[in-house]
Amino acid sequence: MVAADYMLVSAGELPPGVRYTALGLVELVFGGAIIWLALRFARLRLTDAGLVRTELKSDTLVGIGIGLTFAAVQFLLIIPATGGAARSDVVANAAQIGETYAGFSGILILALLGSTSEELLFRGLLLFGLAKLCGGGTAGKIVSTIVVATLFALSHGYQGWAGIIDTGFYGGLLMSLLYWWRGMRLAAPIAAHATWNLIAATVIFLAY
C-alpha cells in the first residue's frame, strides 16, 4: 500500500482528489487480492477471517456507535486539551487533506475504502492468523492483539507521536477488541474505522 502511494505520487502531477481515490481503489482491490491469496495459502477463506453477513446490521450499528463516541471524545476533549491544531497528527492530516474540496472528496473515498482494506489486513489476516498460529486460546488472542496494535500504531508513524498513540489505541487495540467481542466478525471494526475516518477528515478539513 505504501508502494502504491509512492507510485501514484511519482506518476505525474495527479490532482489530490484523483490520487486519493485511486489509492483507495488500489488498496481495496490489490490489497484485498493479496490478503485473499495469503488466506488461501493457509487454506482459509475470507469468511473464516470474519467477512460474513451474520448479524451484519447489529455489528454495523455497534461499529458506528463506537466511531461516533470516539470522535466526540477526541474532538471535544482530548484534541483541544493536547495541542489542538498544533498536534502532530492534526498537522499531518490537514496537510494531506489540503484546502480544496476535490482533495477532501478524494480523502473521503480513501477513508471508506482504506478502512475496509486495513481491517481485512490487520484484523482479518494478521490478528486472526497470529491468534490461530498461537493456538487460538486466550493467550494467543492477547499476543496477537498486542502485536497488531503495535504494527497498526507504527504504520501511522507519519502522524508523529500523537498519531502513533491515538491510532495504536483506537485502530490497533480497540478495533482488535471489537473484533473479538463481535465473534471475530469484521463488520463492526470496518464500520467503526470508517466512521472515525470520515468524521476526522471532515472536522479537520472544516475546523482546522
Image: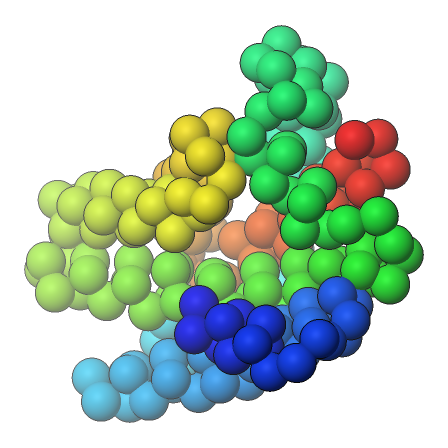
Q: What residue is drawn where x is 70% and y is 41%? A: 94
Q: Is residue 164 left or right of residue 65?
A: left
Q: Nearer the viewer, residue 202 or 140?
A: 202
**Residue 26 seen in render:** yes
Would you place residue 27 above or below residue 166 in this image? below
Give the vertical position of 87 relative to 26 (above or below): above
Q: Residue furthest top?
A: 81
Q: Position of residue 191 (x, y in %)?
A: 63, 55
State the residue in front, 37 or 107: 107
Residue 113, horizontal then vertical, whole percent: 64, 69
Number of dots carrying numbers: 0
Q: Which of the two residues, 120 or 156, is positioned nearer the viewer here?
A: 156
Q: Is residue 12 above or below residue 82?
A: below
Q: Residue at x 59, y 72 (%)?
A: 9
How is the protein colored in the picture?
rainbow
Q: Quadrant of the N terminus?
A: bottom left
* Residue 99 placement, left or right of 148: right
Q: Residue at x 73, y 18 (%)?
A: 76
* Quarter location, residue 75: top right
Examine the rendering and report whether any part of residue 174 can be seen. Answer: no
| Quadrant location of the C terminus in the rendered image | top right
- Residue 53 image position (x, y, % from top left): 58, 73
Which residue is depicted at the point 45% across and 34% down? 160
Q: Quadrant of residue 21?
A: bottom right
**166 relative to 128, above or below:** above
Q: Position of residue 41 (x, y in %)?
A: 22, 89
